[in-house]
Amino acid sequence: MIAILKKELWSYFGNWSAWIIIAAFSLIGTLFLFFFENDSNIFEIGTASLQSYFVLVPWLMMFIIPAISMRTLAEEQQSGTLNWLFSQPLKISEIILGKFLSVWIIGILCLLPSLVYLYTVYVLGVPQGNIDLGATFGSYFGLMVLTAAFSAVGILASSLSQNQIMAYLLGVFLCFIFYFGIEQLASYKLLGGADYVLANLGFYQHFLGFTRGLIDTRDVSYFLLVIGICLFLAKIFVEKKK
């Protein structure tokens, strides 16, 4: 698994793709938070808080993570190197975990430049330091867990697809459905009491608790279960390609 992880990270950082993704992610976040006129602009909100950033990031990750994960398995199959991996002394689970961790690590690295935003808001607060650090760090933890879930979904989409374009489109679609689609469907209240159960099947309700500074074991367990199921299904689909 470590060998696969190193290989994947080297392929991302060696050809500058990871650097470009991190830079683009940071640039978009900066423009929305400090320059564009919108509901996320910190100066227009007038509150020493990064909550608008934590609302924006899942939507960015919804498109960024599938772009990173689309090549993990789909490209291997498209180029024929997947059969070479099968011939190596590697378990399928090690291949899947190595690729999953590489995508997750790059996703986390996309979040690191936002510490500059945290410092900026901390300094600009009146009085200085007037920011809810509990909710802020809880939200960061939630973003890392949510990014892991998106990464697992992206790996699953890549294992299902024959080429990178289909892997990307399927990854974006699944991430959108899990994060926003299920929550939106539950908001129509078409199922009566079952709407609450439906809402809790999606990512949004479980991520919402983290943004309030609450790290609930039920929310963490939910994301761990989703990650485990996605990676297990990806393992099954890859095994069928042997």
Image (cartoon, grey):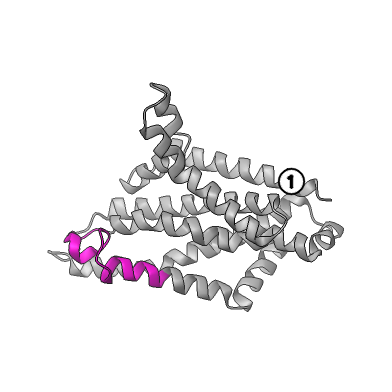
Asked which secondary structure carries label 1, the reply is helix
Which of 227 and 138 lies nearest the eye of the viewer?
227
The amino acid on which the numbered mark 1 sits, given as a three-letter code, is Phe
Q: Which residue corresponds to the image point at 52% horizontal and 75% vertical from the top-left?
A: 19
Question: Can you identify the residue that label 1 sits on?
Answer: 237
Whether residue 43 appears in magenta in the rendering, the answer is yes
* First to last magenta residue range: 26-49
**Residues packed near mark 1 inside 10 Å, few (<14), some (14 to 19) or many (20 plus):** some
Q: Which residue corresponds to the image point at 49% horizontal and 62% vertical from the top-left?
A: 108
Q: Residue 71, position in %: x, y? A: 66, 63
Most extreme residue toward the left, as rendered? 127
Q: Residue 112, position in %: x, y? A: 42, 67
Q: Residue 212, position in %: x, y? A: 30, 45
Which of 165 and 210 lies nearest the eye of the viewer?
165
In the picture shown, does residue 17 fall above or below 152? below
Q: Is residue 110 left or right of residue 35?
A: right
**Is residue 216 shown to the viewer in this render?**
no
Q: Residue 218, position in %: x, y? A: 45, 35
**Is residue 4 shown to the viewer in this render?**
yes
